[in-house]
Amino acid sequence: MPRFRALVLVGLFLVHQAAGHSLAAQAAPATGIAPGARVRVRFDCTTRGTHESCHTATGTVTNLAPERLTFTTGSVEQSVTPATLNEISVYGGTGHRTVRGLLIGLGAGAVAGYVTISITNGGCIDQSSSEMDNFCLYGTAVGSVTGALLGAGIGSLIRYDRWRPAPSPWSAARTDRPTLRLLLTPPLRSRPGMLGVAIGF
């Protein structure tokens, strides 16, 4: 019976340790800040009057320690601490300016089409005939569609880096929710093993 109780306690201890490691492993990637991740860091901000000056660097994380984040920018290695870190973002892939180009091209094409028809036909505002109104409307529509297609095509060729703001890698590891822990005391010859519960905040 004592051996069985000892095995049960050891089993509970191992399950508790495995659960703790699993939760820690899940908490770290949640922010996306881990060795190998590409980050943009804003640090060492100083304020002089109303002007704020900061250092900004983009690099790859090489090490994340309890009190220091190390990353490389090209061949230069830099590091920040919780006290010097002001803002950090994680690389979220490459985006395209297709929609923005479409909207800009739509507006520019509409204006260009309207002005062109107005100049070549004596003005769309001065002449109020229904035929002229339809002609001006048609020219504006054609200009809008043409401009939208050209703008979308040009915008799709323009790429930019997407950055997702992330919480501090040190504050992300903390939680405001209470934690439940098992306190296990291995059995000895002089006393039996003990199992307890502790609640932390």
Image (cartoon, rainbow, N blue to C red):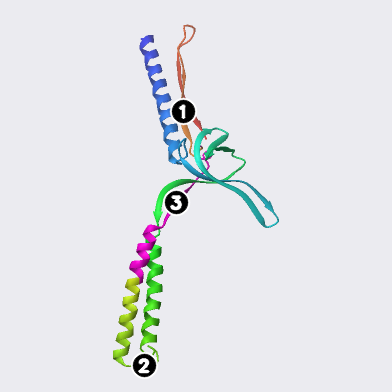
Residue 141 position within the rendered picture, expressed as x and y whole percent measured from the top left: 32, 77
Please tell me in which quadrant of the rendered image residue 50 appears: bottom right
Going 30% across and 85% down the picture, which residue do you hit?
Answer: 135
Amino acid type, callout 1: Arg
Mark 2, secondary structure of its residue: loop
Instruction: Name the residue tied to disc 2.
Output: 127
Front position in the image: 173 or 181: 173
Front position in the image: 12 or 191: 12
Q: Mark 3, residues whose alpha carbon is within 10 Å: few (<14), some, or many (≥20)?
A: few
Are discs 2 and 3 less than 8 Å apart at CB? no
Instruction: Name the residue tied to disc 3.
Output: 161
Q: Do we see residue 175 in this rendering?
A: no
Going 39% across and 68% down the picture, which residue do you hit?
Answer: 103
Task: Give the answer, above or below, for where 76 lies relative to 108.
Answer: above
Q: Which mark is residue 181?
A: 1
| Magenta-drawn segment | 147-173
Q: Do we see residue 91 in this rendering?
A: yes
Which mark is first along the chain, 3 or 2? 2
